Structure formats: structure tokens, C-alpha cells
Amino acid sequence: HEIKEANPAPPTAGTTLRFIRLSGLFMDSNEIGSYEQTIGVPILESYGLPECSGIASSNTLEHVKHGTLGQTCDGLDIAIFTTDPENREMLGPGEIGDIAVMGDNVTGGYLNDEMENKFGKILTFNREDEVEEWFATGDRGELDENGCLMLHGTARD
């Protein structure tokens, strides 16, 4: 990624651009810092996919941790599970595994794709012994101690 010095000055007074949301592209923290200095607004990294109606986690203006994809958005849960589809267990902070999301806006499955539906779902039990259904995103990652998501590639890598 090459930074162009076309406009190194911060935006002038009256500019309405408050931030740039970065999703679908990984950038090194140093690159982000350089771009922020050049354009004069924060860059907020995020993570999302169509199956959860867009953004699942994001840095915010109030909480930015570069090198992560931020914390889970309201109405969603994100968890990391072991990578063995026959023996799924939820992992703790700092452990790398399969990213899964759960929430009202997450898809219930794919039309006429039984195989994808079988491997795209993770079932767990909550404290009331009710079944919870997670959607396996196909990505690998980890959550840090603050609940910030970090991406480590795809499950197919």
C-alpha cells in the first residue's frame, strides 16, 4: 500500500467526514496510522459478512484498538470455537479457532445447500439448557481479553 502525499494537510474546518470505516481489507497498524495522519480522520477497522447483515464487529470513535476488528456490535455475539467440526468447544481469549456469530440478524442457513448448512452451524447450550445456534463464518480468528476480534485467515487456508 503506497501512501500518496497529494493532500498531506488535515481536512479544513467545516469538513463533515468524521471517520473512515475499513472492512474487507487488512492493513498494518503502521499503515493505518500513516493514512490517518495524511487524511486527518480516524480509520475504524471492522469485520462483517452478508450472512449477518453487514458489520459484526467494529472499532468505534470511543474505542479504537488498531490491529483488531473491534468489539462485537450490539445485538450480536461472537465466539471462537475449536476447528474440529465433529467436536466443537468454545475457546477463551487469545485462542485461535473458527469465528462464529449469533444474533437475530444472522442467517438461518442457505436455500437448497444442505452440506453448507450442516457445516455452517454450531450448536451449544446456554445456562438455561436451551440450544443456541451459531453461524460459522468460515474465518479463523481470536478474541482478546477485551473482546476485540483479530482475523487469522480463513478456515479453508
Image (spheres, rainbow, N blue to C red):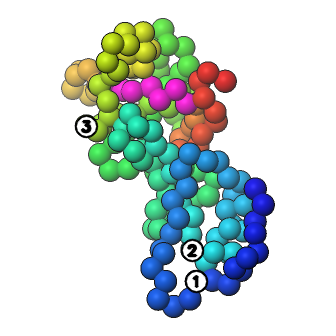
- The chief SS type of the magenta part is strand
The residue at 33%/22% (across/down) is: 109
Q: CA distance from mark 1 to mark 2?
A: 8 Å
Q: Which residues are magenta?
A: 133-139
On screen, residue 32 above or below 110: below
Is residue 74 on the magenta stretch?
no
Residue carrying label 3: 104
Quadrant for the C terminus in the image: top right
Badge 2: few (under 14), some or many (20 or more) residues near its Cα, within 10 Å? some
At a point 61% along the width and 47% down the height, the residue shown is 25
Write the residue at 59% across / 24% down.
Answer: 155
Q: CA distance from mark 1 to mark 3?
A: 39 Å
Which of discs 1 and 2 lies nearer the camera? The answer is: 1
| Residue kind at label 1, given as amino acid type | Pro
Query: Is 13 left or right of 33, judged from the image as shown?
Result: left
| Real-space CA distance between mark 2 and mark 3, rounded to the nearest whole angstrom | 32 Å
Percent x, y for residue 3?
75, 66
Q: Which residue is mark 2?
A: 41
Mark 1 nearby-residue class (10 Å; few <14, some 14–19, many ≥20): some
- Ranked by sequence position, the earlier of labels 1 and 3 is 1
Name the image quarter holding the N terminus.
bottom right
Residue 92 visible (yes or no): yes
Q: Nearer the viewer, residue 108 or 2?
A: 2
Element assignment for label 3: loop
Of all residues shown, which one is farthest toward the bottom?
13
* Circle 1 residue: 11
Q: Mark 2 and mark 1 in contact (Cβ < 8 Å)?
A: yes
N-terminal-most mark, 1 or 2: 1
Residue at (64% x, 36% y) in the render? 152
Q: What SS does tag 1 mark?
A: loop
* Image position of 52 (left or right of 8): left
